[in-house]
Image: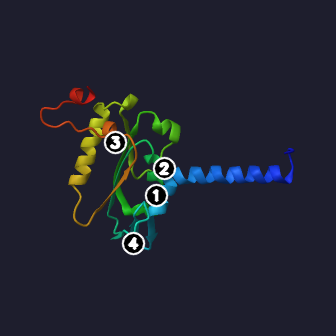
Amino acid sequence: LQAGSVVTERLKADAEAVWRAGLSAVSPRDMVFNVCRREGDVLTINSPDHEPVEASFDLKYNVKVVAFGKAVLGMVNAIEDLLGDHIVAGIASVPVGYTATAGSPAHPIVEIREGAKDNMPDKAAVETAELVLKLCSEATKDDIVLFLVSGGGSALLPLPDGDITLDDKVR
């Protein structure tokens, strides 16, 4: 195949289309928009595996967001774009250094907190877990608590209880 030939150009275009489709399939932002939609003041969430499961919720400036994992910054950005000022509070727990590399969400409604340096539970992650627990325990029956989850949750939201200490969890 010669560079610049019609066949070569077509193969390059096809390869780029496949590459873009692969990126879109794993894009945290696209994943949110694939399962969540808003029509007026109604949020509808579909099953991510496209099963015929659907739930709808009335938006009344009553959404609280809890997000944790390595890929949630894109998810938080998407849900903030989708729901805007209907989000009244939120906390996202991400690994140390992720906001520097991925950037903060465009609409900082959800508080971004870093913890779990080197993927190990730490004091910052425990403090975030305590804030998440408080946020959830303050939710009322009229609130929507929306969870956005990707990998890394066990280190990002540790909450030692009883006789188990943070050191025990790390060991």
Task: Tell me the CA gap for discs 1 and 2.
Answer: 9 Å
Q: Residues within 10 Å of mark 2 (few under 14, many from 20)?
A: many
Secondary structure of the residue carrying tag 1 is helix
Secondary structure of the residue carrying tag 2 is helix
Look at the picture and state if 114 lies above or below 41.
Answer: above
Q: Residues within 10 Å of mark 4 (few under 14, many from 20)?
A: some
Q: Residues within 10 Å of mark 1 (few under 14, many from 20)?
A: many
Residue named by callout 1: 32
Residue named by callout 4: 42
Task: Tell me the CA gap for discs 2 and 3.
Answer: 16 Å
Amino acid, disc 3: Gly
Residue that appears at 65% across and 52% down: 18
Residue named by callout 3: 153
Q: Are marks 3 and 4 in contact (CB under 8 Å)?
A: no
Which comes sooner in the sequence, label 4 or label 2?
Answer: 4
Quarter that holds the N terminus: top right
User: Which label number is shown at residue 74?
Assistant: 2
Task: Tell me the CA gap for discs 4 and 2.
Answer: 22 Å
Q: Are marks 1 and 2 in contact (CB under 8 Å)?
A: yes
Quarter that holds the C terminus: top left
Residue that appears at 85% across and 44% down: 3
Image side of residue 67 versus residue 101, left or right: left
Task: Tell me the CA gap for discs 3 and 1.
Answer: 18 Å
**Front: mark 1 or 2:** 1
Task: Tell me the CA gap for discs 1 and 4.
Answer: 16 Å
Image side of residue 120 versus residue 73, left or right: left
Task: Tell me the CA gap for discs 3 and 4.
Answer: 29 Å
Residue 117 visible in image? yes
**Front: mark 1 or 4:** 1
**Which residue is at the front of the view, 44 or 140?**
44
Amino acid, disc 2: Gly
